[in-house]
Structures are given as C-alpha cells and as structure tokens.
Image (spheres, helix red, strand yellow):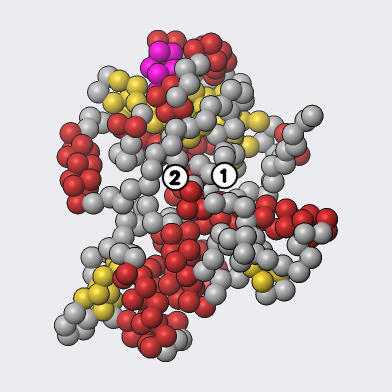
C-alpha cells in the first residue's frame, strides 16, 4: 500500500516468519488447532531424489467417505500436524460429518496401501453471510509422510464433485493468513480471494 | 498496489524462464517483449542469478535458465529482493506518525500491508503460470465469440 508515494509500514517481521508446514486446518467449525511450523529450506537434488523414489514407491490413492473405524487415524493425523490431540472433537466431527453424505456434509479420507493418509471436511451452506448456497471446506490435512504426491489435490477434487452433485457452483474456505503452505495449495487449485472480508475483535 | 519497474521486470523474467524449465531464454528476447533496454534488464537478471533463482548460460545464444522450484518459489520471494515489503522503524518514519491520527493511519496501512504480503506469499510461480494460461484461454474464448 502506498500513500502519496511513500511506502506505508508493516508490522510484519517477514524474515522472522517461517512458512507453516502444518496441515490445512481452515475455518473448522470449532477447535481448530495451531499448525506446526517448520523452517524454510531450499530443496536440493537429494530432496528431489528422495521425493522421486517415494513417489515411485507409493501405492495408489483412493478417496472415500469416512467410516467410524477411521476415527483413530483421522485423530492421529490431526494430532501429528497440529501438535494437539483432540479425540472428543474428532468423535463429534465424525458423528456429524461421517457415514457418507448427509445434509450436504462431507468427511472424506484418502487411503493409500490400506492406511488413511489424509482427510477433508466440507459442507454446503445456504445463505450464510448473504451468500447463495456454496461449498465450504473447513479442513484438509495430509500426513507429512504422504505429501507431495497429490493426496490433497485428490481430496479436494472429490469434495468438489460432491459439491457439484449438491448443485453448488462456488467453493469457499478461510484460513490463517500466515499459513502460506495451505494458502498456496488452495491457490494452486485455482482459488483466489473471494468477495468477503473476515473481521474480528478482541472482547474485553 | 503498484510494483516498481525492476520488480515487475524480475517477475516477468522469472515467469518467462519458469514457463520453459530446463531451457535457456536469451535476455534480449525478454527485453524486446517487455519493451525495456537490455542494459536495464541485465541488472535485474544478475540479481535473480545472485539469488539462485536463475543461472546464466554462456556461449552462443546464451541467456538464463530457471533454477528455482516453481511450486515453492512465491511472488513474495521475488518481490522482496527488489523492494522493501517490511520496512524498519527508521524507514517507515512519516510526518506526524506519533500523533493519534498518525498512529491510527499506520494501523490501517499495516493491516493492508499484511494482507498484501500474505497474498504474495501464497502465490507460487507455478500458480502464476496457471493463472496466465487460464486468462489466455478465457481471452481466446472471448475472441472466438
């Protein structure tokens, strides 16, 4: 932002900020945890070789609705990514969003080699904030060991298919602005800033 | 929001190089396409090379080649090499900044800056290339109609 030709200041200590490597807990209905942080590191040839060998070794990824038996895996992935175990919260989420499509709610998991390696939560909401029906993505998490292999992309694509079946044509999410990693992911999928601006205030 | 000329040139260059990974692009081609002098562009390119984003290719038809990771390199990573996105206290000195009105204005401008920075940090070069392709397709579609 520039006013009269001079650069306006920012309080953001950019160099001090590290890219979050955590999960994409976005605007979860409640209880969204702080994602873990990891230092920025340039990827070198060795990293690329490791990624390549891991990709080759990786089993195919299947996306399916979550089942009650997925509770432990989903809770564990979230705990690994956010550093906070929230068993009761995830039991509630699975109860409300699990077991296939109900009332436009979706909790999907990604399975690779018989293991759950990621999940996504979304819901169609009508006329909230004055918006026509749209598909909200509340959270997306991929186990750190299963990243960079398209799990997130497949999860989001499956969610989008569900939203389309429900007749909505807009997908929306909200997340911490310092969560560059997940913001980058959503942007890589074609998402841009929407017409809404979130506001908040500390209550005394 | 306005970027300085060198910043725009740096972004143009990075996008040109990243669009053809592994291949080198002659500097004069970029200078010609974006209407700048090769001399001016050379300074920008050497800064990008110093940062390891591109590397120079010597010999006949020499130029530069993209060496970054397009899926990780963000607009912020490029822009901050060319302009101050997080000024220090001394740099952000303004007339009347310590008055109540000055402090309130600083608060609002800081909010805008933080959102702008978050936007730059979240858009990778790969995403930019996708946006370009999408807009190109849309423009082609409009022309066809």
The one of A144 and A161 positioned closer to us in this rendering: A144
Q: Is residue A127 above or below residue B26?
A: above
Residue A169 seen in the figure: no
Q: What residue is at 67 percent from the left and 75 percent from the top? A: A5
Residue B109 at x, y = what percent?
70, 58
Q: Earlier in the sequence, mark 1 or mark 2?
A: 2
Which residue is disc 2 drawn over?
Answer: A19
**Is B47 inside the magenta-drawn segment?**
no
Percent coordinates x, y for residue A139 in the rendering = 51, 30
- The residue shown at (73%, 53%) is B107
The residue where tag 1 is placed is: A177
Residue B103 visible in the displayed image: yes
* Structural crowding at the residue carrying mark 1, measured as other residues with C-alpha within 10 Å and reported as few (<14), some (14–19) or many (≥20): some
Q: Tag 1, which secondary structure? A: loop
Indicate left or right for A127 with A167 as reference. Answer: right
Q: Residue furthest right?
A: B100
């Amino acid at each position: 932002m520039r006013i009269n030709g001079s650069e306006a200041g920012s309080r953001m200590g950019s160099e001090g900020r590290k890219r979050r490597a955590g999960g994409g807990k976005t605007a979860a209905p409640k209880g969204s945890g702080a994602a873990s942080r990891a230092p920025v590191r340039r990827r070198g040839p060795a990293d690329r070789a490791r990624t390549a060998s891991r990709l080759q070794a990786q089993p195919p990824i299947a996306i399916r609705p979550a089942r009650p038996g997925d509770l432990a895996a989903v809770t564990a992935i979230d705990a690994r990514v956010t550093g906070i175990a929230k068993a009761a919260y995830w039991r509630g989420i699975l109860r409300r969003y699990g077991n296939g499509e109900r009332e436009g709610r979706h909790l999907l998991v990604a399975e690779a080699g018989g293991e759950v390696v990621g999940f996504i939560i979304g819901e169609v909401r009508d006329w909230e904030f004055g918006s026509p029906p749209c598909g909200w993505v509340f959270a997306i998490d991929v186990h750190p060991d299963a990243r960079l292999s398209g799990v997130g992309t497949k999860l989001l694509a499956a969610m989008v298919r569900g939203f389309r079946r429900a007749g909505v044509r807009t997908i929306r999410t909200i997340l911490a602005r310092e969560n560059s990693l997940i913001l980058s992911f959503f942007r890589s999928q074609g998402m841009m800033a929407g017409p809404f601006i979130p506001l908040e205030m500390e209550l005394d | 929001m306005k970027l300085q000329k060198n910043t725009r040139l740096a972004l143009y260059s990075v996008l040109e190089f990243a669009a053809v990974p592994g291949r080198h692009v002659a500097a004069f081609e970029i200078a010609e396409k974006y209407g700048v002098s090769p001399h001016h562009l050379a300074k920008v390119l050497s800064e990008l090379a110093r940062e390891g984003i591109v590397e120079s290719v010597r010999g006949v038809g020499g130029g530069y080649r993209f060496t970054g990771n397009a899926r990780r390199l963000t607009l912020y990573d490029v822009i901050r090499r060319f302009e101050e996105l997080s000024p220090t206290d001394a740099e952000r000195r303004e007339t009347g900044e310590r008055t109540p009105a000055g402090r309130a204005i600083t608060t609002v401008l800081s909010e805008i800056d933080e959102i702008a920075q978050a936007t730059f940090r979240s858009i990778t070069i790969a995403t930019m290339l996708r946006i370009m392709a999408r807009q190109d397709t849309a423009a082609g579609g409009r022309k066809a109609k």
